[in-house]
Image (cartoon, rainbow, N blue to C red):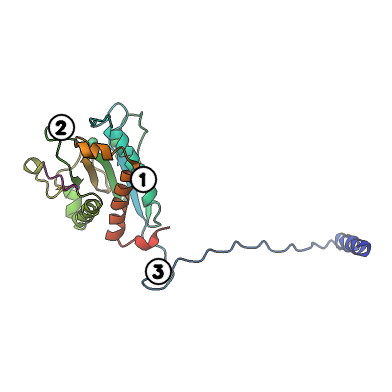
Amino acid sequence: MKNFLIDLLHSILRALGDGEVKKLDPIPTPQKSMPKIDPETNKPVSEPDKIYKIGISPGHGGSDTGAISANGLAEADVARKISKKLLERFNYNKAFNAVIYDYGINEPKNYSGRVKQSNSRGDDYYIPVHLNNWTPKPSKNGWLVFVNPKDAEKNPYLFPLCKEILNSLQSAYKIGYADWDKDRDGYMEGIGRKVYEESTPKADTVYLELGFLSNKEWDAKMADSSVHDKIADSIVSAFEKFHKLEKFRK
Ligand SMILES: [Zn+2]
């Protein structure tokens, strides 16, 4: 031990005397985790060719609560809860980059501000999240997805995407399609021809009306966060399926 210390001291002095700089061991590079294997091709999952920018816009906000259910649920509140679940799920896939445009539950809703943000971010999809309400017929329930006909003209895939979303929601909860406004706006199986209160975003808009708060059973379900999970899962998996992006899940 003593000899070792002396040797060490000598070598340090020698190194100092020679002006020699002792090389440090290289810093070990962190081990890369094993790449995910695509079960179909048996090859590592590659990076997505494109990252879809998604802007989520929870309906209403601030003093505008939107619809209020018989149990006292506010549309604005439920829309925010579902929007957050959508955000998490989209961002669980490498092929999506999602944000929520919102100024908080206590802030004014400011839709045009959200659209401006979406336009400058260059979103591919803009997704307003709402729930329907029609007290004259409380038994009424159903899914509704609106698209802007101008978007659909430019992008013929938009209606098929909406059908995929509707089918996916329908397989989660069989509540039908809300084509109740057919004679007013010509809605077809829940895919509306006329859009929304929000000014026109540059992104393709997929405007969701997620059931009717005026429906007693749905009102009860909307208090349950596992129902929000299932709804968000259905919507995001429809986007993934439509664009074939399941394999990019993190
Ligand atoms: Zn609304």
The span from disc 2 to disc 3 (Cα, nearest Å) is: 49 Å
Res 135 label? 2
Question: Which residue type does callout 3 highlight?
Answer: Asp
Percent across and percent down for residue 204 are 25, 50
Q: Is residue 202 visible?
A: yes
Q: Earlier in the sequence, mark 2 or mark 3?
A: 3
Outermost residue toward the left?
Answer: 183
| Residue 235 colored in magenta in the image | no
Instruction: Kindly tell me whether residue 132 is visible in this rendering.
Output: no
The residue stretch that appears in magenta: 175-180
The residue at 28%/45% (across/down) is: 127
Instruction: Choose top left, top right, bottom left or bottom right for residue 227.
Output: top left
Residue at the disc numbered 3 = 38
Q: Residue furthest bottom?
A: 42
Secondary structure character of the magenta stretch overall: loop
Residue 177 spot, x, y in % from top left: 16, 47
**Helix, strand or loop for disc 3:** loop
Give yes or no for residue 178 being in the magenta stretch: yes
Read off the residue under disc 1: 85
- The N terminus lies in quadrant: bottom right
Q: Secondary structure at mark 1?
A: helix
Circle 2 Cα neighbour tier, 10 Å, few/some/many (<14 / 14–19 / ≥20): some
Of tags 2 and 3, the one toward the viewer is: 2
Mark found first going from the N terminus, 1 or 2: 1
Q: Secondary structure at mark 2?
A: loop
Q: Which residue is found at the position 28% from the left and 32% from the top?
A: 73
Gap in angstroms between the C-alphas marked 1 and 3: 26 Å
